[in-house]
Amino acid sequence: MVSLVFPRDFLWGVATSAFQIEGALDAGGAGESDWRRWTHRSNTIANRDTAERACDHYHRWRQDVGLLKWLGVRLYRFSIAWERIQPTDGHSCSSKGLDFYKRLVDELLSANIIPMVTLHHFVNPAWIAELGAWLNPDTPKYFADFCSIVVKELGDRVRYWITINEPTAVCGGGYITGKFPPGEKNQTQHYFIAIINMLRGHSLAVRAIRATAPLLPRIGLARAHIYFEPFDPGESTDRRATQVTDYSFNRIVLEPLLTGEVPEPPVEIRHHFPAKVSRQITGLAKSLDYIGLNYYCRVRVRAPETGWETIGGKWVHTEDAQITAMNWEVYPPGIFNILMYYKGLLGDLPVFITENGYPTEMRPGEDTTEDDDRINYIATHLAQIHKAMMAGIDVLGYCYWSLMDNFEWAEGYRPRFGLFFVDFATQKRIPRKSAHFYRNLLKTGLLLEP
Ligand code: NOJ
């Protein structure tokens, strides 16, 4: 069997986010958030799960760093809850909130683990939500101010920053599917306005980080990139629908980050695009040191039957698709194809695989640590990443999503992404077979070709 060799300095890691793992949502004087309020409304979250306790990481962070040490990761990606740092408004600043993350970072550094900090991972403080969240043109400025506070406090120990996680996913949930706060459905103009404001927020945040950081920062943005293909490649309408969908969910964020300009919307959906919004974003071009890629699945696209009522085609599985507990199709070559597509676009800009992961569904009585499917998912995706690296793509590192089972947004605790199984009743963490697999991989940097 052939072994694929990863570079010695490859940054192997795992990822989490604050709201999904921390719990203790009031601790240290933390403020309210849009997501906390959302989870307490009826029928928003599967099984009426909330994130009040989640993985109780707020109290178990030291033990969780122990899990990272055991795995042997070189890097840990986590996020900072804005509402812990600025609980009440743009003038507030909580030293208790900052202290929590300072202790975490210090513990990571003493374990020789590089911290990679996400500054916005889906959740807004309630006071931002009350201002209209990312529809408000002032939110980018508030966000940049928050970033300055964090970087002033942590910038002497943190170099890897991610400004915003998955603008298309958070705005899609908030304004298209209605599964995330504020729960609007098919508010297509809002979708585009919020995304463009997030790009503005990224641009201002980068400026703020560079102006404040004592250590030379490495700044990225983590983009969700879905690999779209036509349901029927022989149908020109499916092919066209795929291009339109690719615009709304991929190109809308990717291209402005490179050129500073939101690309012109396809004619079919131009009426969904806000007429008065400028497509030029100051300071955005060349704002990145690397681009974060979150890759999970392929989506097959069909042409809409009744015209372009929304911003993309219909998402339909083919019969032979291998589907996960999130109803996503497993398709490892998608990540290779995306990386190859980046080749012509990115120039010298390196890529960081900021997320890639496999959800399982726990049924009562099942052995929750036997997860060969997950191992296979990781191995086959890494093999594709390796192939792209051999073809000349500069990939700095890889974060598996996620370190442990956690609160999966609208789906609650049902889908489990963790290398560690979490028993939410006892908060016990148990390494799955995949955790052992990942640990061995990280020891050698060698992957047996799957
Ligand atoms: C995307 C998000 O960044 C993360 O929060 C989520 O849990 C995973 N992907 C899985 O859906």
Image (cartoon, rainbow, N blue to C red):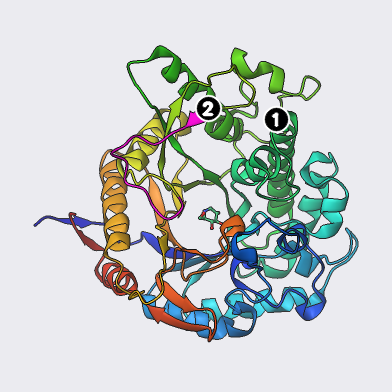
Q: Residue furthest left?
A: 1
Q: Quadrant of the C terminus?
A: bottom left
**Residue 212 x %, y %:** 73, 57
Magenta portion: prevailing SS class:
loop
Mark 2 vs ligand 1: CB below 8 Å: no
User: Image check: 315 left or right of 165?
Assistant: left
- Per the image, the residue denoted by label 2 is 245
Residue 86 belongs to magenta span: no
Q: Residue at x 69, y 73 (%)?
A: 52
Q: Nearer the viewer, residue 66 or 32?
A: 32
What is the secondary structure assignment of the residue under circle 2? helix
Mark positioned earlier in the residue sequence (2 or 1): 1
What is the number of callouts on the image? 2
Q: Are marks 2 and 1 in contact (CB under 8 Å)?
A: no
Please determine whether, in this image, residue 94 is positioned above or below residue 450. below
Binning the other alpha carbons within 10 Å of mark 2 as few (below 14), some (14 to 19) or many (20 upward) gives: many
Asked if residue 207 lies left or right of residue 112, the reply is right
Residue ID at (73%, 73%): 25
Where is residue 343? Give x, y as percent.
39, 32
Residue 315 lies in the magenta stretch = yes
- Magenta-tinted stretch: 314-326
Q: Residue 296, how many percent across, how many down?
A: 42, 48
Q: Is residue 117 left or right of residue 210?
A: left
Residue 107 in which image quadrant? bottom right
Residue matched to label 1: 188
* Residue kind at label 2, given as amino acid type: Thr
**Is 271 or 365 nearer to us in this picture?**
365
